Image (spheres, rainbow, N blue to C red):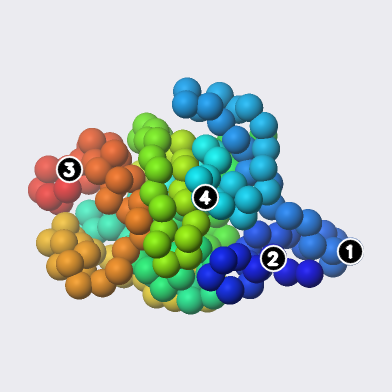
Amino acid sequence: MPITPANGQTAEDTAVRTPGGAAEPIMLELVDEDGTTIGTAEKLAAHQPPGQLHRAFSVFLFDEKGRLLLQRRALGKYHSPGVWSNTCCGHPYPGEAPFAAAARRTAEELGVAPALLAEAGTVRYNHPDPSSGLVEQEYNHLFVGLVRAEPAPDPEEIGEIAFVTPAELAERHAEAPFSAWFMTVLDAARPAVRELTGRSAGW
């Protein structure tokens, strides 16, 4: 049976299909406060209050004008549906390097391979999501990069995309709902973003 979270939506993205068609739960890597792996947990269980600290990643891609590529999460997502967020975010599979996971999910969600992808540090946070009742307890690996190809978003993952300047982001952030973690990960990545895009881009 499909997993149904507290908000009543079917969590199709908490399971993967095997070649035979069977659904297997997606497992996440649990970590301690230093980011050392200490075990695994099923994806939805790791996000149930109070949350289990797990490994995650966030990607920020920019075009040649220094504009940030945002995505609005698809309405069918079980967690934070319909809100704007950074280019791509997710969780490495147990044993998968965060860099490899970031590149994989960027391709899966947006249909593009970054022209450049570089590590931008880590950030640890605890963000409850009031609408779903789920909790993001994450040790997040940050990545910044460039995108030169035209994105081809997967509609099951992404409802809309937009390239924004810092001023346009501020205006959109004031008017539209964003993911609970967005400003935390953006602020943590800003030094690397500024190094990538240059002072004139305004980040």
Residue 58 x/y as whole percent: 42, 47
Are circles 4 and 1 on residues that touch, CB within 8 Å?
no
Which element is circle 1 on? loop
Q: Amino acid at mark 4?
A: Pro
Mark 1 or mark 3: which is in front?
Answer: 1
Of pointers 1 and 2, the one earlier in the residue sequence: 2
Residue 78 x/y as whole percent: 55, 67
Numbered marks: total: 4
Of pointers 2 and 4, the one earlier in the residue sequence: 2
Q: Quadrant of residue 11?
A: bottom right
Q: Amino acid at mark 3?
A: Gly
Which element is circle 2 on? loop
Are circles 4 and 3 on residues that touch, CB within 8 Å?
no
Which element is circle 4 on? loop
Of pointers 4 and 1, the one earlier in the residue sequence: 1
User: Residue at label 3?
Assistant: 198
Q: Quadrant of residue 167?
A: bottom left
- Using residue 57 as the reference point, say whether residue 200 is left or right of it: left
Q: Residue at x 30, y 69 (%)?
A: 177
Q: Residue at x 55, y 40 (%)?
A: 52
The answer to whether residue 177 is seen in the rendering is yes
The quadrant in which the N terminus is found is bottom right
Q: Which is nearer the eye, 37 or 60?
A: 37
Are circles 1 and 3 on residues that touch, CB within 8 Å?
no
Q: Residues within 10 Å of mark 1 (few under 14, many from 20)?
A: few
User: Residue at label 2?
Assistant: 3
Q: Which mark is residue 20?
A: 1
User: Residue at label 4?
Assistant: 49
The answer to whether residue 104 is seen in the rendering is no
Are circles 3 and 2 on residues that touch, CB within 8 Å?
no
